[in-house]
Image (cartoon, grey):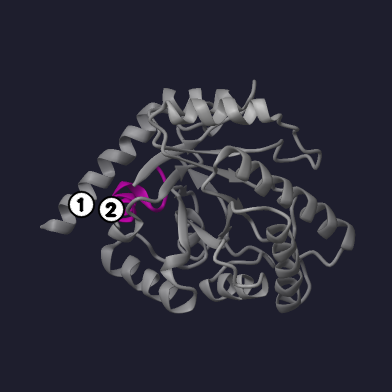
Amino acid sequence: MLIGAHVSTAGGLVKAVERGVAVAADSIQIFNQSPRMWRPTSYSEEDCAAFREALAASRIDAVVIHAVYLLNCGSDDPDIRAKSLVSLTQSLRVGDQIGASGVVLHPGSAKGGDVGEAIKRAGEVIAAALADSDHCGLHLENTAGAGGTLGRSFAELAALTEAGGGSSRIGMCLDSCHLLASGYDVRTNATLDAVLAECDREIGLERLHSIHLNDSLTKLGSNRDRHAAPGTGEIGESGLATFLSEPRFDSLPCVMETGSGEKGAGTAADVQLLRELRKRGQRQRSE
């Protein structure tokens, strides 16, 4: 498992690699632009080449990009969908340029409308963005289930994949906090096995390409997306040990988004804790 953290690109793309190395990360996640603005950040080929060179010289084996929060590919507002398409396409193109494993996407929300129709609209945006980029993967992230958010179940992730054309470039990113919040108990070997069995039936575990490792401030089935620093929430150290030691997650980028540092940044101590919890879970599985 490639355990790492979300890191800032402030000061330039290369700075993200430096920050990942500083916390001893094996994988990093970045925003390719401000997560709360539509305006894209322009990177030159020199910027991207310097990033690739720094990455190759580091301990970091994988980088994923998180698409900006403003995107709503399933919106019934044509203007929002058009902006979402431009932004998502840009993220995928940057992913192509820097050698990213994939772009993680919150698929969007139906708001108060029909979820099925929103999934169809999201699929059209996804298909168009993939057609206008080269090879970077798109990882649909499961959601906590609040309101009309899309991707709150494995069935919805499967429907989004199909609506997007079923391309092999479409995968998924499973978030531990969102799973718990949407009613999937991932805290014991037995319950996690049942969750992954359902995931395999609905969409296929071969589409699982990345992990978000977040503890949850809220209880099972709360449908509230509230992250906690590792070991301090409802999943807790025991549950995280189970999740981290799941053999089917081996070799995947596993990115901590909320740590114990300033403004929720992941620290070297947080990354080390996750590695220790993974080992603890592996020992327990072998007993």
Q: Main secondary structure of the magenta part?
A: helix
Name the spot of residue 286 as percent of width and height, x first.
Answer: 13, 57
Residue stretch in magenta: 231-244
Q: Are marks 1 and 2 in contact (CB under 8 Å)?
A: yes
Residue at 59% x, 29% y: name it: 49
Q: Amino acid at mark 2?
A: Ser
Name the spot of residue 195 as percent of width and height, x first.
Answer: 39, 70
Helix, strand or loop at disc 2? loop
Q: Can you identify the residue that label 1 sits on? A: 282
Asked if 104 appears above or below 267 in the picture, the reply is below
Q: Describe residue 285's horizontal placement relative to residue 259 as left or right.
A: left
Q: Describe residue 106's horizontal placement relative to residue 155 as left or right.
A: right
Which part of the image, by quadrant, shows the C terminus? bottom left
Q: Nearer the viewer, residue 245 or 180?
A: 245
Q: Amino acid at mark 1?
A: Gln
Q: Describe residue 286's horizontal placement relative to residue 119 as left or right.
A: left
Q: Earlier in the sequence, mark 1 or mark 2?
A: 2
Residue at 70% x, 72% y: name it: 119
Q: Residues within 10 Å of mark 1 (few under 14, many from 20)?
A: some
Q: Describe residue 39's horizontal placement relative to residue 185 as left or right.
A: right
Q: Nearer the viewer, residue 163 or 74?
A: 163
Name the spot of residue 284 as percent of width and height, x first.
Answer: 17, 54
Q: Nearer the viewer, residue 265 or 160?
A: 160
The answer to whether any part of residue 282 appears in the image is: yes
Name the spot of residue 28 as percent of width and height, x first.
Answer: 49, 37
Q: Residues within 10 Å of mark 2 (few under 14, many from 20)?
A: many
Residue at 67% x, 30% y: name it: 45
C-alpha gap between disc 1 and disc 2: 5 Å
Q: Can you identify the residue that label 2 sits on? A: 245
Is 242 inside the magenta-drawn segment? yes
